[in-house]
Image (spheres, grey):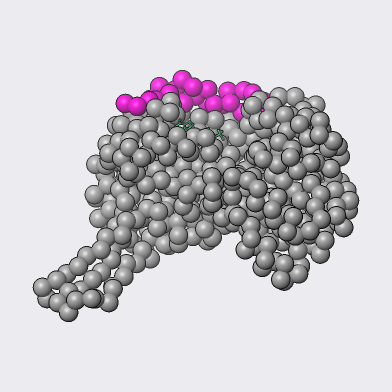
Amino acid sequence: LRDRLKDPSLLREQCYIDGAWSGTSTIAVTNPASGQTIAKVPHLGAAEATQAVEAAAQAFPAWAKLTAKQRSNILRKWFELIIANREDLALILTSEQGKPLTEALGEVDIGAAYVEFFAEEARRVYGETIPTQRADARLIAIKQPIGVCGAITPWNFPSSMITRKVSPALAAGCTVVLKPAEETPLSAFALAALAEKAGVPKRVFNVLTGDAPAIGKVLCEHPAVRFVGFTGSTEVGKILYKQASVGVKKLGLELGGNAPFIVFDDADVDAAVEGAMVSKYRNMGQTCVCANRLYVQDGVYDAFVEKLAAKVKAMKVGDGTEQGVTQGPLINEAAVEKTERHIADALSNGAKIITGGKRHALGGTFFEPTVLADVRPDALVAHEETFGPLAPVFRFKDEAEVIKLANNSPFGLASYFYARDLGRVWRVAEALESGMVGVNTGLITTEVAPFGGVKESGLGREGSHHGIEEYVEIKYVMMAGI
Ligand code: ADP
């Protein structure tokens, strides 16, 4: 991998703690397309996490005291460096994660867009003046950085999930300790190397890999940490929520989803098929906003299934760095097994395979992109997130029925639906229990909009001007005796 990078210094195999690159590289990072080791990274634990938190606490006052413009300029520089190195960053990303290179480039770009947006937003953290209730007093509310922030990120978006947390934190004046996923630490280290180059002062941004539960516990329980931002499974999110209660710590949680994707009779079916392809098969179905359950109304059901299957059959599976590949390998064996389990369960309940359905001839963790029809509402896949390239298509009769089906989930991250009737569009958008709704589109993520879920899909919002609010505390000041 190093030989293929324009700037080999972006491939780091050490952690960045307390202003220095350190740690013995022992844990293998593998390329899911080949199973080969591409780098080794340190396995650190509670002691180093504590050191990183204390370094971030030490750096906090000076960073918080910079003017918003000074922080903004540094973030802007970081953004520019990410863009200047986007090809190397994408190659590192695909090599450790598996997604097609074009998608990796897209992720680096959206990741950079968060940095750009929050570089701008840094200068707009406005407070307020409040009409007084006392003649001798004046009231204001100011916004101050919350303090040291922990960030724990997943492997499915190794780059953009980091910038979406770290850039608003830095913009607000917070310092950060990041623990990226063990599967994909290289993108995190490369981003840290560029942040260092951009002029982010030593100790303001720390990154370490290793024992996830031990590091997570320090981030949740160390008194200096005031906020923990997490993207990952609902299961781990609940552990962090409990741990954070010890010190009454604020949390941002972006957890699992189980997105319904609904196609009504009045939809543009071709557009719905396009949307389903993007929403379902992006990153091989391994995104928390991926369509997990496709509900298609009677009148367009057969046409939709046929057109979707035709597109799915045309996808090219292979190593993400190869030209024309649109589906890479899944992240690991467990991901393959879960997809297989969902397929087997649906089939045992009368569903039928339209295309795909099994491991790909390429071996490893490659899987055939799959479409199942006639899936029953009680199938396992209706209730659990697959996180794989499986599109189960359910049939429904009317609007009330499908809203009930869609909302029958403890999760509520994204939903999608295709319809043209204006009344229906409003009714359904309002009725769906999710933090985000895509109407006539399968792709909703952008740095300018608030990303987040309801119910067990999480707490808080990332991106947009709401995203920076997570990293500030409101302080009310009454000035009396005037
Ligand atoms: P996934 O199942 O998609 O890998 P996880 O929730 O297990 O999702 O992982 C998301 C992130 O949470 C990763 O960085 C992982 O290392 C971290 N993680 C896993 N378990 C814990 C834990 N007990 N405490 C803190 N972080 C954890």
Magenta part of the protein: which range? 23-47
Instruction: Judge by depth and name the residue closer to the eye, 120 or 5.
Output: 120
Q: Is residue 399 above or below residue 309?
A: below
Q: In this image, 479 relative to 470: left or right?
A: left
Residue 35 lies in the magenta stretch: yes
Q: Quadrant of residue 372?
A: top right
Residue at far bottom of view? 135
Instruction: Judge by depth and name the residue closer to the eye, 26 or 401.
Output: 401
Residue 75 lies in the magenta stretch: no
Identified at 46% across, 42% down, the residue is 230
Give x and y (percent) for residue 394: 79, 46
- The quadrant of the rendering that contains the N terminus is top right
Residue at far left of view? 481
Q: In this image, 157 relative to 314: left or right?
A: left
Instruction: Judge by depth and name the residue closer to the eye, 78 or 223.
Output: 223
Give x and y (percent) for residue 354: 86, 39
Q: Is residue 183 visible?
A: yes
Q: In this image, 70 relative to 155: left or right?
A: left
Give x and y (percent) for residue 174: 33, 49
- The quadrant of the rendering that contains the C terminus is bottom left
Q: Quadrant of residue 178?
A: top left
Q: Is residue 363 above or below residue 69?
A: above
Q: Is residue 457 above or below residue 94?
A: below
Give x and y (percent) for residue 145: 31, 54
Residue at far top of view? 26
Q: Is residue 8 visible?
A: no
Identified at 80% across, 26% down, the residue is 361
Identified at 81% across, 43% down, the residue is 312
